[in-house]
Image: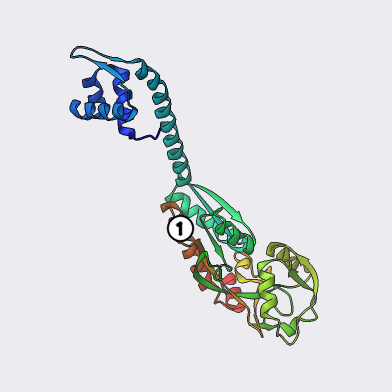
Amino acid sequence: MRINFDLGELAAFVAVAERMNFRAASEALFISPSALSRRIDRIEEALGVRLFDRTTRRVSLTEDGEQFLTHAGEALAALQNAISDVGDRAERRAGLVTVACIPSVANHLLPEVLAQFAKLQPDTRIKMLDHSAPQVLKAVVEKQADFGVNFLGAQEPSIDFAAIVKERYVLAVPARHRLATLRSVGWEEFVGERFISLAADSGNRMLLDNAVAQAKARPTTHVEVNHVEGALALVRAGLGVSAIPRLALTGTSSKDLVGVPLTRPLVSRTLGLITRKGHRLSTQAEVLAKLLVQALKKAGVAQNATPKDRRKGASAA
């Protein structure tokens, strides 16, 4: 048998069966007694049986009515539980923002941004996925993250890539290194240095390899590491030099490490906000995304300072 009555008629039946009074049931449902009677008539007609014995003084369930009440009550309770569960899940999702970021953003910009966000949205929980560029892209594509900050994704058909800032790569060297005072350095100028490179499967390494494929000369890798932070630790220890995105030097004292802009060829990457096409961010996610964009733009302005400018600024401070 097909179900050819609606939820309102089912609710009307249960309301009358629980109260055995049409007027009380109509008041509970906020409808008129006549409208309630029409609902009961329609459900009885749909089922082909009488559910109630009605007189001017008394209402009682028929045998069919008693049998149907058992199942109808269970059905309404199950539906209510389903509605509550969906509502709870939606509420939990609304209170959580998941952001995927490449490590340089996660380590150097996101902490300050999250501190600002906590003041604006104190009840919102944050999940941070600090991954390599390919993994950040995958997290957004596969709906593991609400949005991401990445330099990959512009060519991905399912992704909207909103460019934020163009970031140059620099040669990270110890502050007392012979190259530290230069305004820029070509790849051929440090061929003889011990070079610390990033892992072959990292987004940074792929970008660097593509950019310098036509360079006249390039250094030989002496040490390979998985992450930029690892490369910086080795440079800091005097074990070599490394090509890294300038953002990774944020917060580093110029008395410790210096980033010299790379030239011949110049290498850069465009950082952008990535979201799934057609996906609308929640209010909380939108706030966090805007704060991140502002921080990235501010960091981009700071990148224009030369090594000499940065040392002057450090001395003045």
Q: Residue at x 38, y 22 (%)?
A: 68
Element class at badge 1: loop
Q: Which residue is mark 1?
A: 279
Quarter of the image with the N terminus in it: top left
Left or right of 278 in this view: 214: right
Left or right of 112 in this view: 48: left
Res 142 quadrant in image: bottom right
Q: Position of residue 3 (x, y in %)?
A: 38, 34
Q: Residue furthest top?
A: 57
Q: Nearer the viewer, residue 88 or 51?
A: 51
The image shows residue 143, relative to residue 72, as above or below, that is: below
Amino acid type, mark 1: His
Q: Position of residue 244 (x, y in %)?
A: 67, 71
Q: Position of residue 211 (x, y in %)?
A: 66, 79
Quarter of the image with the C terminus in it: bottom right
Left or right of 287 in this view: 139: right
Q: How is the image coloured?
A: rainbow
Q: Residue at x 21, y 21 (%)?
A: 23
Q: Residue at x 47, y 53 (%)?
A: 117
Q: Nearer the viewer, residue 142 or 130?
A: 142
